[in-house]
Amino acid sequence: MNSSYLLGGSFGVRESGGVHNLPTELLSYVFELVTHALSQDERNTLGLPFHPQTIRAPVWLSAVNRRWRHVALSTPSLWTSIFVSVDNIIDYSGDERNSSSFCGSKRLLDVESLAYFLLRSGNCTLDIFIDRRDPEWDFSDYLDGDDADDGRPSARHPFDAQITTHILDILGHHVYRWRSMTIFSDTWAPLHAALCCLSVPRVGQGSFSNSRRGASCLETLKLMQCDEYNIRNEHFGSGVLKEPITTPFAGLAGYPDGPSSHVLPARLRSISLCGVRVNWSDFTRFISGTWSGLSNGIENLELSYHHRDVRPDVTAFQRILEGCANLRSLILKHSGPQWVGRTPQGPSVPLPRLETLHLVFDSAEEAALTMSTLCCPGLKALTLEDGIEAEGSPNDASLLLIYCGTGALRTPPRPGNDSTYDSLSCLPHSESRSNVPLFPSVQALTLEYVSASCSIPYALLLAGLPNLRRLALRHVPKYAFGSLLPQPVFCD
């Protein structure tokens, strides 16, 4: 429902029929639909609990007439979407004529709108979206506090770390009401400041504070650094910014029986860390089953855009997965474990409830090794995507496709000295098809920018998915479609 359509022509007009005759309960429900209703497609596209463009809907609705204002102010659920962006930043420029004024400019947070929503939402749970992205920000000037090699001063983002800390100081007093927390940022320094607030609660008036319950209503936590180039090239600034955050998200815990009792958010179901560096051992303990209080545990996990040098080692990665025994969705985009020596380590982690897996890789060999750490026979949707830069040459993903189809972590022997396979009939049966498929329940497969040396790896993959119903091939070589044709009988 479009709020502008609902409100069109209503300002200053006294109507005696239509929506104005609705009972208060129905009118309140209509207001909620205008403010919060999102289709499933919109939720999947935005990845947010609400649409930022509807954040002002309660304000508009309350300005129509006296009755609508009463209904809007009497409905706390209308005011539960907290949205802070660069539009909430006030830039006070210095007065050149007054030498006593501060030089340059000073940016402050406009807290009036934030205070209105926090007050009018009552005791309802809050969906919070802190959007630090600036449409006019030039990523080429981004140095996050470091001067350029040519002596140029670093560019200052209008939404700096101090403002981020100020916002979380205010919201921290309502931490027990948080339902979702989403932070998008162009640069790393404000995300680092946010992580510090969420990980190391500070004591004192006006600072981020814990309640006895902690973030007991928190269901979704998403932190994203949006500068893909820098985060993939390990640009985390210098000094303290370069150090990983220890005890990540410990500030969300509650202490119901004093300092000795440590309870994590029991409703937390979804965690997404994109371009965010933490101490992975401590993060493992955060989501591990050894930390009681997670109830059913994490069901949706996303780790994206981590340079190889800042990824968890294989042991830490496996322990993260072990702490998510009820995981249903896993997204790994340019992330995953560090593979030193590129050999499998230990048994795979059982994930019996995993249904969706999206893997974006920059090394097909490492992607195959990462897949070998997972045991997910109930997987229903598999997406493999080569994340190589557009101007670069594509990976040869033969090893990854063969592993997903056969479970073999090595390339089958090729006939003679030929660099490609001529046909499936030349492969031994034991090499071309495993007795038990790795992914017997997969019904939807998507391959995007995935290239192999010939059609044989594609055919092996499809042969290992007996229940496949939907297939999407995007930007793949033409010979990949040959794998859909009938193949010769395997020989022993």
Image (cartoon, rainbow, N blue to C red):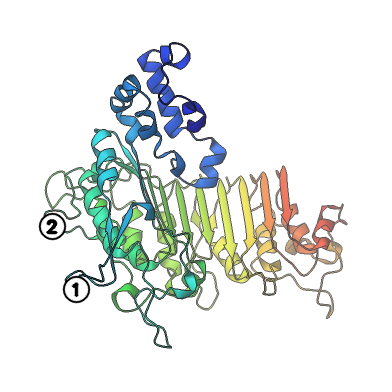
Q: Where is residue 325 in the image (x, y as percent from the top left)?
A: 43, 49
Q: Do the residues labelled 2 and 1 touch (CB within 8 Å)?
A: no
Gap between marks 2 and 1 measured at Cα? 37 Å
Q: In this view of the protein, which residue sits in the foreground, 173 or 111?
A: 111
Q: Position of residue 70 (x, y in %)?
A: 29, 22
Please give the residue where the numbered disc 2 appears in the rendered image: 203
Of callouts 2 and 1, which one flags the residue occurring earlier in the amino acid sequence?
Answer: 1
Left or right for 358, reference 21: right
Judge whether residue 62 can be spotted in this image.
yes
Specify the amino acid type for callout 2: Val
The residue carrying pointer 1 sits among few (fewer than 14), some (14 to 19) or many (20 or more) residues within 10 Å by Cα, namely: few
Mark 1 element type = loop
Specify the amino acid type for callout 1: Ser
Q: Position of residue 154 (x, y in %)?
A: 38, 77
Left or right for 367, reference 260: right
Tell me, for residue 99, which label it has, or none: 1
Between marks 2 and 1 in the image, the one whose residue lies nearer the viewer: 1
Q: Where is residue 220 in the image (x, y as percent from the top left)?
A: 39, 46
